Structures are given as C-alpha cells and as structure tokens.
Image (cartoon, helix red, strand yellow):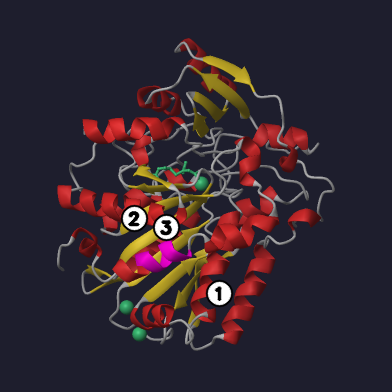
Amino acid sequence: MPHRLSQRAGRTAVIGFVLIALLALAGTASGTTTPDAPTTAEYVVSGADTLAARNAVAAQGAVINAAEHGVLDVTATPREVDRLRALGYRVERRVTAAARVAPEPAGRPGDFPPQDSGYHNYPEMTAAIDRIMAEHPSLVSQRVIGQSYEGRDIVALKVSDHPGADEDEPEVLFTHQQHAREHLTVEMALYTLRMLTGSYGDDQRVTNLVDDREIWIVPTLNPDGSQYDIATGSYRAWRKNRQPNAGSRAVGTDLNRNWAYRWGCCHGSSGAPGSDAYRGSAPESAPEVARVADFVRSRVVDGQQQITMAIDFHTYSELVLWPFGHTSKDTGPGMTAENAAVFQTLGKQLARTNGYTPMQASDLYVTDGTIDDWLWGDQGVYAFTFEMFPGAGGLSGFYPGDEVIDRETSRNREAVLRVLSYADCPQRVIGEGC
Ligand code: GEM
Ligand code: CA
Ligand code: CA
Ligand code: ZN
C-alpha cells in the first residue's frame, strides 16, 4: 500500500540492515587458509537506493549486509559481482577489514578472543544452561530435539511452572543463532532463561507468565557454524551451517533460506552452493532446520498448533520484522487484512519498547525460505524476526564487544514479556476477541 511505503521510505534510507556473511575477508584478515577457501568477499554497491534496486541486488544471490543511504554492503561471489555490474551498478571491493574481525590477541582455538570472553561458546553455553537448570529444576526442563550436521545436540529448553507436564497453555517459541556469527543472540537466549527463572516469585508479571505459558527457547540452531566461526581463535564471519554440498567445494547452507514454505520461490535466495544465501538442495535439507521444524510440528496437539507466537533472533540492524518476506504484498494468500493488522500493530508496539525500527520483512528486500514465513505460512504462528544491536557497522557489526551484552539483551526484556502476554490471543492487540 502506497501510504505504508512512503511512510517507510525515509526510515529505510538510514537503516543498516544486515544479512550475510563474509568469508573471504575474514579468512584473509585472520591469516588463515581453509580447505573450503571462500569464494565470497565484501563489496560496496552504489546506485541501489530503491526497494526495487535492493530486490534486484538480492535476486542475483548477493547478500545485503547493510543498506544505508543507497549504498549497500554486500557479500558476493565474483560471478554475482559480474551480474551486478552488468545491471549497471557500481561495485567496489571493500578493502578495509573490520578491526574486530581479526582481534588481537586471538583466543584459544574454539574460544572467543580474551577481550570477548563474556560471550559463551557452545560448551560454555551448555554449562551455563546446566547451571541454571540445576538452580531452577522446578521451572526448566530440556529436550534434545536432534543433532546438527556435525553431531552437536540441538536443545529446546522449556520454562514453565510444571516444565515436565504438557499443560493446556499457550506456547511461545524463541529461536537463536540460525546464523553462526550472530553470537549476541545466544546471549539473548541465556538472558531470557535467567530473567524468567531469576524473577520468578519476585516479579508478579514474570511469575504469572511463567505459570500460564509454556515457553520454548532454542538457544542455538547452528552450533557447528558457531564453533567454526571461532575455531581459529579469530572471527571468520561465518554465516551458514557446516554441511558439505554435493559437487561443490563450498560448504554450508543458509539456514534462514531453507525453511519449507515457498522455498526458493521468489528470487530471495541463491541456488549456488558458494553463495552466502544458498538455500540448500531441498526444503529442510539442513538437518538443523529439519529438527527444529519437526519440533514445531510436534507441538500440534489435537490438530491445534500450541505455539501461538515466536521471535527469531538475529544481528544486526536493530529491526523488528514480520512476514511475509517472500512477497512485497501486505496481504494476499495466507495473510488476511486482519492478520497483517496484528503483525503491524504488535510489531510497531514491540519496536517502541526497544527502539528498533519496525517493518514488514520484504520492505528491506525479498527473502524466501525464512523461518518467520514458514512459522506463519505453514504453522499459523505469529512470528517476528528481531535484528539486534548494533544499528549499523559493516562486518564488525557482528562482533560488538562483550561489554554490550547486558545492555543489549535486557533491552529486549519488555518485548519478550509483551509477546508472552499476547500469546493467549494475539488478535487482542487490535481489539479483537478470541
Ligand atoms: C536476515 S532476516 C531476513 C529478513 N526477512 C525475513 N523474512 N525475516 C536474513 O536471514 O538474511 C537477516 C540476518 O541474517 O540477520
Ligand atoms: Ca501445552
Ligand atoms: Ca502452568
Ligand atoms: Zn541472521
């Protein structure tokens, strides 16, 4: 709708929107060479200052990491760069490697650099969860819902007052770290777990929500990529999972292009294994996506999906996004005017609580095979994507220092609680009954 678009135009210009990874630069910066030598690199694309232009860039398979004032930071393969130039865009190699991507001094292999030791690697995350569960056995239970490609456990934590029982209560899903380098999102999961358990019994609002909801937290969907990102002790800026691709040296699928709703439909992902937006060989071809999708489907009881609302956490750009991403239409098949009003009203309300910028996902550019499109389109879950801190920042935006963790996770406290509150009847936000 025109009025929405014009409203947004100004905002969109100043949005740093983040999408994808940067392998080549990271590898070079950290002085490492890997057998799967990256084929992508970071470029600056100018002359792309409209939504149509962003969609055209994304449709070539390039991943748009940020869009500010018509200048795009993209991660692209040489072939994608050729296609962008053929379309008439000016494309320059970005030469300055972000300082934080090759931090000095480097950490121990498989760990964060010493100055970022406040972040949790996968074993540390597991230990932190175990400690919280030991402190609050009556509030948290854990389910291993499957394994990653390399065999790491993917877990779903359940927070509720009777976590061992399946009560007849609205369920809410929080997912984290589909993209390896978005480590702040794991801290968000730990924050939510600590906040809900730590305030239980003290804070009446939290107590009521834990009593009357069943809250699922998947703290990482991509443990393999996460560990790979820090495997050398320096950051690689890895995005995808670590699953090999038949017939290619390029490793990995972009998990957030692999979900089974209108997969690959709309020029919002890539069919090239070397691309950072590679959608995989088939919907749910990534085991991590398949296991989480199976878990979500397992929450259908008596024909009714128990999960009513969800947030999928990413970094960075400080955005609240909602479906659909695969089409720029506001309404249409699978999205009534009332559904769209719920998303818009609640999305704007959530954004007021954390200072992020709200918009329909496709107002940045079209993406297909994302989790929020699948959760809504296939499962009827009111699902949002949050892009956390920072608002802008190139490649280093993925690696804010650990001193921001407390501030930038607690920044989402109110949004998390608000989603939990509306989970019994999301339509209430527009004054409709259930
Ligand atoms: C994103 S989120 C894509 C935006 N669209 C939808 N439907 N959520 C991505 O997956 O590229 C940004 C990120 O990676 O953080
Ligand atoms: Ca239940
Ligand atoms: Ca209960
Ligand atoms: Zn992401």
Give the spatial CA distance, label 2 vs label 1.
Answer: 24 Å
Please state which amino acid type lies under the numbered disc 2: Gln
According to the picture, the residue beneath numbered tag 3 turns out to be: 353
What segment is highlighted magenta in the picture? Answer: 413-419
First in sequence: mark 2 or mark 1? 1
Give the spatial CA distance, label 2 vs label 3.
Answer: 7 Å
Q: Position of residue 78 (x, y in %)?
A: 59, 21
Secondary structure of the residue carrying tag 1 is helix
According to the picture, the residue beneath numbered tag 1 turns out to be: 194
Q: Position of residue 129 (x, y in %)?
A: 60, 74
Q: Using residue 204 as the reference point, say whether residue 232 is left or right of it.
A: right
Please state which amino acid type lies under the numbered disc 1: Arg
CB contact under 8 Å: marks 2 and 3: yes
Q: Look at the image and say whether residue 416 sits in the magenta stretch.
A: yes
Q: Position of residue 256 (x, y in %)?
A: 45, 46
Q: In terms of secondary structure, what is the magenta stretch mainly?
A: helix
Density class for disc 2 (Cα within 10 Å; few <14, some 14-19, many ≥20) is: some
Q: With respect to residue 78, does 226 lie above or below?
A: below
According to the picture, the residue beneath numbered tag 2 turns out to be: 349
Residue shown at 42%/86% (left/top)? 161
Q: Quadrant of the C terminus?
A: bottom left
**Residue 247's quadrant in the figure?**
top right
Q: Look at the image and say whether residue 404 sits in the magenta stretch.
A: no
CB contact under 8 Å: marks 2 and 1: no
Label 3 CB, ligand 1: below 8 Å? no
First in sequence: mark 1 or mark 3? 1
Residue shown at 23%/33% (left/top)? 3
Density class for disc 3 (Cα within 10 Å; few <14, some 14-19, many ≥20) is: some
Please state which amino acid type lies under the numbered disc 3: Thr
Which sits in the foreground, 27 or 174?
174
